Amino acid sequence: MAPGLAALEMDTEGGVDYEKTDGNPTRCVRVMNVFDPAKVRDLSDSEYDEWKDDLEDDVGNEADRKGRIVHLRAKSSDDCGSVFLCMRTVSDAIMVASAFAGRYYDKRQLKTEYLLEDDYVERFPKVGPRLKKIDALSNGAGAGAGAGAGDSGDGSGNGTAGAPAPVASTMPYLPMAAMLGGPSSIADMYLN
């Protein structure tokens, strides 16, 4: 069991809901009751843009302390007043869900739930390629021509099954967003 998971499973008062994933955490978290959707719908376009930027910055700054954010989006059309987050790892998502569950934001108690990654990608299609790149990097793919999970990395395809491809030690440091071909800063990620 992942660290912190036992505490989350027992935290029914805090509002972590595992129904969407049959009890298994995923990289995708929905933080509910963050705002009143009825009030947001009454905002002018410029007020809405400012509100959304502020809210995504607030949630993003807190989530960024707990893990690496792949995607963040506040959805005013959501009836539960939700902010959706996709984290780089399940461990990061567990930390974020734990940090938000049961806390108060703007006098509203927050509730969190994990979402199936396929459902999240269906809702936010641009996230799919990012997750695939993260998975490929995590599995050692891309370290050599034809290298993939279970490949020796020499391009022959005759590697040891299940063994990760070797990673070149001379690989220069690049920010994760640059490796993923994404935005150049965390703030840019929130706006995509």
Image (cartoon, rainbow, N blue to C red):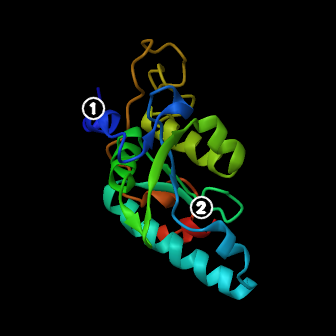
Residue 124 coordinates in the image, percent (x, y):
68, 51
* Residue placed most toward the observer, 78 or 50: 78
Whether 177 is drawn above or below 16: the answer is below
Q: Residues within 10 Å of mark 1 (few under 14, many from 20)?
A: few
Residue bearing mark 2:
81
Disc 1 vs disc 2: which is toward the camera? 2
Residue bearing mark 1:
6
* Residue placed most toward the observer, 59 or 33: 33
Residue 126 coordinates in the image, percent (x, y):
68, 52
On-image quarter of the C terminus = bottom right
Amino acid residing under circle 2: Gly
On-image quarter of the N terminus = top left
> Going by the image, does 17 lie left or right of 126?
left
The kind of secondary structure element at disc 2 is: loop
Q: Residue at x 46, y 37 (%)?
A: 143
Residue 56 disc label: none
> In this orientation, does residue 141 appear?
yes
Whether 3 is drawn above or below 158: the answer is below
* Residue placed most toward the observer, 182 or 101: 101
Residue 90 coordinates in the image, percent (x, y):
41, 39
Residue 59 coordinates in the image, percent (x, y):
45, 66
Q: Are marks 1 and 2 in contact (CB under 8 Å)?
A: no
Q: Earlier in the sequence, mark 1 or mark 2?
A: 1
The kind of secondary structure element at disc 1 is: helix
Amino acid residing under circle 1: Ala
Whether 28 is drawn above or below 175: the answer is above
Q: Residue at x 44, y 21 (%)?
A: 152
